[in-house]
Image (cartoon, rainbow, N blue to C red):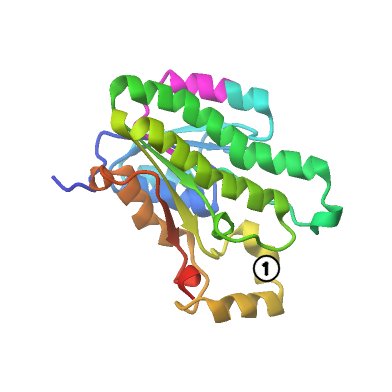
Amino acid sequence: MSPFDLTGRRAVVTGARRGIGFGMAEALAAAGADIIAVSASMEAEGSATEQAVRAHGRAFEAYACDFSDREAVAELAAELGAREVDILINNAGTIRRAPAAEHPLDWWDEVIQVDLSSQFMLSQAIGRAMLIRGYGKIVFTASLLTFQGGINVPGYAAAKSGISGLVKALSNEWAGRGVTVNAIAPGYIATDNTQALQGDPDRSRSILDRIPAGRWGVASDLGGATVFLASAASDYVSGVVLPVDGGWLGR
């Protein structure tokens, strides 16, 4: 049996309706996992995510949750914490762009809640049940801004830096009890969140000039790392933030 085989595993993937989360959900399904997909606007039936998962012969469930609403996230965490979840992919996120000197505080609060606080809430509830069973895989979506400060995105940079600390903190407590905790740091991936950068000729060119691979990433580029960190192949890997960035950080 391949150590990458996820047959019989159940995975929760947040932010799974499109972009990186969609790619992660499809990769996990292709490896054999059943998928619980969560997104603020996830359709109850007939979503592209559902179609992709079912095309691989896997079971699918959908939940809609506004990750900026702490009460809604608490309800979701309690419900999923009562389920048998083997894999948690904390991918839901948002970004707000404005210079730091003019950055609205309500934007800051929103980004911290969606990109950091909600992810801790889900990890706490689902992780507690994983600890009881003695098995679990938790994977966060970090960012290049986990390592760098970015421009005009102070809340996002703070939240994604916080993800690195949270990964290490949870790993320190849980890795010895059968629950590994890691993160993937995507590089510049062509998604809705990076549309403003893709549409700016100067920024897009400066970004491409820095990427040794010579192209923007696509969501499917995250699939291999996701399956690795969600599978038995990574049983001795914990507390790691793994860049998938076309070589950006090595430049």
Work out whether 20 lies above or below 251.
Answer: above
Q: Nearer the viewer, residue 21 or 118?
A: 118
Work out whether 28 lies above or below 199.
Answer: above
User: What x and y, as percent, mark residue 209?
Assistant: 56, 81
Which residue of the protein is positioned furthest toward the right in this rendering? Answer: 102
Q: Residue at x 66, y 36 (%)?
A: 113
Is residue 91 among what the camera can see?
no
Q: Residue at x 60, y 27 (%)?
A: 73
- Badge 1 marks a residue whose secondary structure is helix
Residue 46, magenta (yes or no): no
Identify the residue position indicated by label 1 in the image: 197
Q: Nearer the viewer, residue 169 or 128?
A: 169
Res 200 → quadrant: bottom right
User: Which residues lie in the magenta part?
Assistant: 75-88
Which residue of the protein is positioned furthest toward the left in this rendering? Answer: 1
Relative placement, left or right, of 214 versus 8 is right
Residue 80, magenta (yes or no): yes
Q: Residues within 10 Å of mark 1 (few under 14, many from 20)?
A: some
Res 206 → quadrant: bottom right
User: What x and y, as percent, mark residue 17?
Assistant: 54, 45
Relative placement, left or right, of 172 versus 47 is left
Q: Residue at x 30, y 42 (%)?
A: 57
Work out whether 171 lies above or below 19.
Answer: above
- Which quarter of the image is occupied by the N terminus? top left
User: What x and y, as percent, mark residue 244?
Assistant: 44, 62
User: What x and y, as percent, mark residue 68?
Assistant: 68, 35
Relative placement, left or right, of 158 versus 45 is right
Is residue 240 among what the camera can see?
yes
Task: Give the amino acid at mark 1.
Answer: Leu
Image label count: 1
